[in-house]
């Protein structure tokens, strides 16, 4: 019984830590891996809360598909968060 | 005296506190950050917190999954009294059905937001929301 409590508290603290990490992290690829970790921990918590169908859907969509579309977006745009602060020559300024 | 740790409701309250903290972290990321991808990441974290809050509201202590398996029914006629008796120790299935829909809708919202981010980057060559000011494409 006490091991069950320790497991639940560990998973909850891991979820909060991964959320803070993916907000604070400047490298967007690592931040996306952090959101994947949040979804994985959330799937285990759904299984412990007696919701196995929701856990299966979260594991499929939250871990795999959301991470894949975020990585596709980062591949098409910038990787680091600091790059958005650099002043780049754009088409609207040339006019 | 049959006193366990689950009588303290400490598990349910810790789930509520964690869900509200994750919602607050996601709201901070969506409101404060300058990068558009970070805003979408914050919205995704916000979705996860709301899903955890809804599922943990429907949970009762030491309940079972809301599934009528054949080993549980055991050739019992499915009258209303038998169904009430079988579903006493089960968790609430209504928030689970709602969250099952909300996960898929959250994925769709994230996909649309990221496609808009890619379109904005191809037009403005930046993702800083302070530099994207003009409304005319």
Image: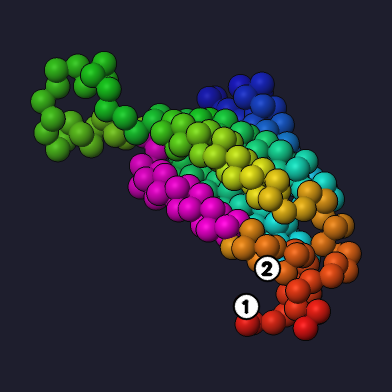
Assess whether residue B107 is covered by the magenta stretch: yes
> Residue B36, position in %: x, y?
71, 62
> Residue B76, position in %: x, y?
14, 22
Magenta part of the chain: B90-115
Label 1 sits on a secondary structure element that is loop
The residue where tag 1 is placed is B137
Q: Which mark is residue B123?
A: 2
For image coordinates 88% across by 69% down, the residue present is A87
Mark pair 1, 2: CA separation: 8 Å
Above or below, A33 relative to B95: above
Viewer-proximal residue among B46 and B76: B46
For image coordinates 40% across by 49% down, the residue present is B101
User: Label 2 near label 1: C-beta < 8 Å?
Assistant: yes
Quarter location, residue B100:
top left
Give the residue at the far front of this rendering. Answer: A95
> Residue B82, position in %: x, y?
18, 31
Viewer-proximal residue among B59 and B3: B59
Neighbour tally class for label 1: few under 14, some 14-19, many 20 plus, Cα within 10 Å: few
Neighbour tally class for label 2: few under 14, some 14-19, many 20 plus, Cα within 10 Å: few
């Amino acid at each position: 019984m006490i091991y069950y409590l320790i497991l639940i508290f560990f998973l909850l603290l891991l979820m909060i830590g991964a959320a803070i990490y993916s907000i604070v992290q400047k490298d967007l690829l690592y931040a996306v891996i952090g959101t994947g970790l949040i979804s994985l921990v959330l799937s285990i918590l759904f299984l412990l809360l007696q919701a196995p169908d929701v856990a299966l859907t979260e594991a499929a969509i939250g871990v795999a598909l959301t991470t894949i579309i975020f990585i596709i977006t980062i591949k098409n745009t910038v990787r680091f968060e600091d790059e958005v602060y650099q002043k780049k020559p754009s088409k609207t300024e040339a006019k | 005296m049959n006193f366990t740790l689950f009588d303290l409701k400490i598990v349910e309250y810790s789930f509520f506190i964690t869900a509200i903290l994750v919602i607050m972290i996601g709201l901070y990321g969506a409101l404060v950050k300058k990068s558009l991808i970070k805003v979408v990441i914050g919205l995704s974290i916000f979705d996860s917190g709301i899903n955890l809050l809804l599922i943990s509201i429907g949970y009762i202590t030491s309940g079972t999954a809301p599934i009528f398996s054949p080993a549980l029914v055991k050739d019992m006629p499915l009258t209303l009294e038998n169904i009430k008796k079988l579903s006493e120790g089960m968790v609430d299935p209504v928030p689970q059905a709602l969250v099952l829909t909300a996960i898929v809708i959250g994925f769709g919202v994230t996909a649309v937001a990221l496609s808009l981010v890619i379109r904005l980057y191809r037009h403005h060559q930046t993702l800083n929301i302070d530099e994207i000011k003009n409304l005319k494409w």
